[in-house]
Image (cartoon, rainbow, N blue to C red):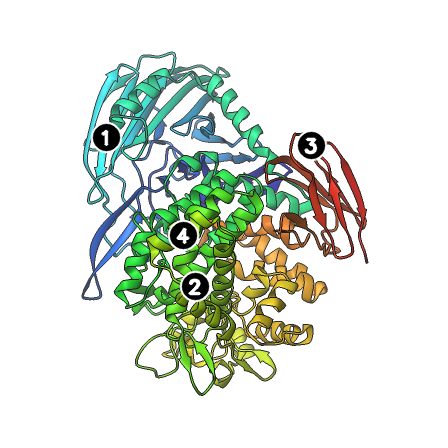
Amino acid sequence: MTVTSWTWEYDGYEPTGERLRESLCTLGNGYLATRGALPECTADDVHYPGTYAAGCYNRLTSEVAGRRVENEDMVNLPNWLPLRFRLPGQEWITPDTAEVLDHRHVLHLSSGLLERRTRFGLGSGRVLTVRQQRLVHMADPHLAALRTEFTPDGFTGELEVEAALDGSVTNAGVPRYRGLDGRHLTHVHTGTVAPDTVWLRCRTRTSDIRIALAARLATDEPVSDAHEPSRAVQRTRLQLTPGRTVTVDKTVAVHTSHDPAISDPLLAAHDRVVAAPGFDDLLETHLTAWDQLRRADLEVPGEAGRVLRLHLFHVLQTLSPHTADLDVGVPARGLHGEAYRGHVFWDELFVLPYLNLHFPEVSRALLRYRHRRLDQARASARAIGRRGALYPWQSGSDGREETQQLHLNPRSGRWLPDHSRLQHHVGSAIAYNVWQYCEASGDTEFLHTKGAEMLLQIARFWADSATWDDHLGRHRIKGVVGPDEYHEAYPGAPEPGLDDNTYTNVTAAWVLTRTLEVLRTLPEPRRRELAERTGLDDGELEQWEDVSRTLHVPFHEGVISQFEGYGDLAELDWDGYRKRYDDIRRLDRILEAEGDTVNRYQASKQADVLMLGYLFSPAELRSVFGRLGYRLDEETWHRTVDYYLRRTSHGSTLSGLVHGWILARARRAEAWTYCQEALRGDIADLQGGTTGEGIHLGAMAGTLDLVQRGLTGLETRSGALWLDPVPLPELSSYGFSLRYQGHWGVRLRLEHGCLNIEVPPSDRSPIEIRLRDRAVSVEPGETCRLVLPD
């Protein structure tokens, strides 16, 4: 692999690495994405072409371990890529069937273009060079295009080319899901519009989403159709002469019945593909759209900067300005594969802070996805006897809990109960994002309406979840699971759930405090309206105030406990397990396969208590603990960091990110090791094959935010930009632009102990900048240079 500032180049054909390459070469535009599979290859153990539309889900029931299990999946749409070729009477040419003399994939990050060049040896001195350019259009989200150029060497003759739209696809991209029903498409029909244009339509089996594709094939030779069951097929015969390049362009339009402003997906797809210009013109408008997105780029030198640019590329392909028009959340694995079934978890906690300062309209849309499902969250709370809103750990189309009841341990082959739905802290993540978005954007309209409604119901849930303990003289929250995920129950307990998970309790207290603050600052008519609609009264507000000050935080051995009783668990033989197993990231699977359980040990999959240092600045974290009646000094926090560093296996791509963020302030010398792990998580596939099933969007966006907010100490609060930089020796010079409360293109650059801030000319008010030792006001059109304290 060769990496430049704006390209990722893969040389050679390696079947074992194809799934990873396909994920990292996915092209998308926020509405639609297609994996970087070779168009001549079908789904098998090596290749997996997959195309996904944001928010397109379907629900099926499968027989698993003697039980009927229902799962909702992001649907693998009909494959628009197929374009295969062969010499007459011979087998189709692919890297698996023909001699590969040379093979290269180039992903162009500046243009959203995937380029492929392969030289096939066909025997008797004959060589066929195939060059392809692929795009998923960033200006028109319903269009995609593939240009294929054939150049023969050493022979003359015909080349048969077959292009298709394939509706026979299933969801089969994740091996551990293959025991589940993955046949999501039904009623597949095909047809011909004109000699060069065919169509395919189908629908999902239970959600009844209608899907339509139309494809136009352009070449100098005649094109015929030859439909097959579930496939719309086009064929042509190219006349090849040595050294002369022959071109075939395939343009495709995709629509679903979820799209606004259409009457019928098939008619919309047909009209769009007929009106679409040729490949060169499509490429020009596509490049213009990508140029406009580059305002979100980070200027970071060296290898880190190149990886960050790849991460930004994939974030924008999943969540682009087109997302602002959709009813979708943040899919944890992007639109890049079928892992986690395309579900929405808490990953927006790591994604929205970056988007808030670049594409606030996208953040607002993602929060509206949560608001539209507020009624479902309230119903989920009522179902367990609680007031307020209980948001699901895994969400899909309609906001019900999509967390599976069973999960497979690939090491043991056993299906096990899944209790991760007890991660009720997802509600706090949503509340945190509401607050962060409104602080960064200045969107008081959202805060006073939809934001306030979500905050109120999430706070109500936490207050109603808290029970008073006379012995402790404090409120407690019992029966939950924290971010760690390894611990779902106490050893030998008949029921799942843990008591007083610190992360859960502290963030619940923060939500209650912030919600009380918002309610106090609402315009009186709006406050009265909200209280009338929700039945909120002064007695309930007094309860919230009390709970926000008295939630229990457990400690042991001078450190903050992950949950009550954590310090009583057994110590794990970490050195012994590292010697026995090459990789212990998924320690839970290793222990279960041995007949043991990670619930018995002081071992964490990822940051749990330490997540608090990721969400809150040191000053705010001290304030939250102080409100709860606990003194959190620097020594206690550093002891806590050290304690959990020794007991964490980093079984999540988010773990290195959080630890790097925290250590940048707690112990700078070790921070870069964890930052590098976060940067390499997907490109090196550190989780052992998982990236081939879809990238880890939260970790990718989180690394961008590490540079944007983590190392700069950037906070948006109280109408000002607060900065407290902690430059690492390995990353001490970098810059970026951001949008802040109506200011576009505010430029920050950190270099040689100085911070430069440039505010473009506009009619906006000055930006207030706060550092530890001073405050300055920067007018539009001004540049400010600040020398930072040591």
Seen from the viewer's position, the closer of residues 173 and 517 is 517
Q: Nearer the viewer, mark 1 or mark 4?
A: 4
Badge 4 is on which residue? 528
Q: Mark 1 or mark 3, which has the lower sequence index? A: 1
Q: Are marks 1 and 2 in contact (CB under 8 Å)?
A: no
Q: Is residue 438 left or right of residue 664?
A: left
Position in image of residue 614 (x %, y %): 58, 61
| CA gap, disc 1 and disc 2 | 41 Å
Q: CA distance from mark 4 to mark 2?
A: 29 Å
For marks 4 and 2, the one nearer the N-term is 2
Where residue 578 appears, x then y in whole percent? Answer: 54, 73
Which secondary structure, mark 1? Answer: strand
Residue that label 2 marks: 425
Query: Residue visible at 80% across and 52% down?
Result: 788
Q: At label 3, which amino acid type do we have?
A: Pro
Task: Please tell me which of labels 4 and 3 falls first in the chain.
Answer: 4
What's the amino acid at mark 1? Arg
| Mark 1 or mark 2: whose residue is earlier in sequence | 1
Rendered location of residue 376, percent (x, y): 29, 54
Q: Which residue is mark 1?
A: 201
Instruction: Give the vertical position of 63 relative to 632 (above or below).
Output: above
- Residue 760 is tagged as 3
How many numbered circles are shown?
Answer: 4
The first of marks 2 and 3 along the sequence is 2
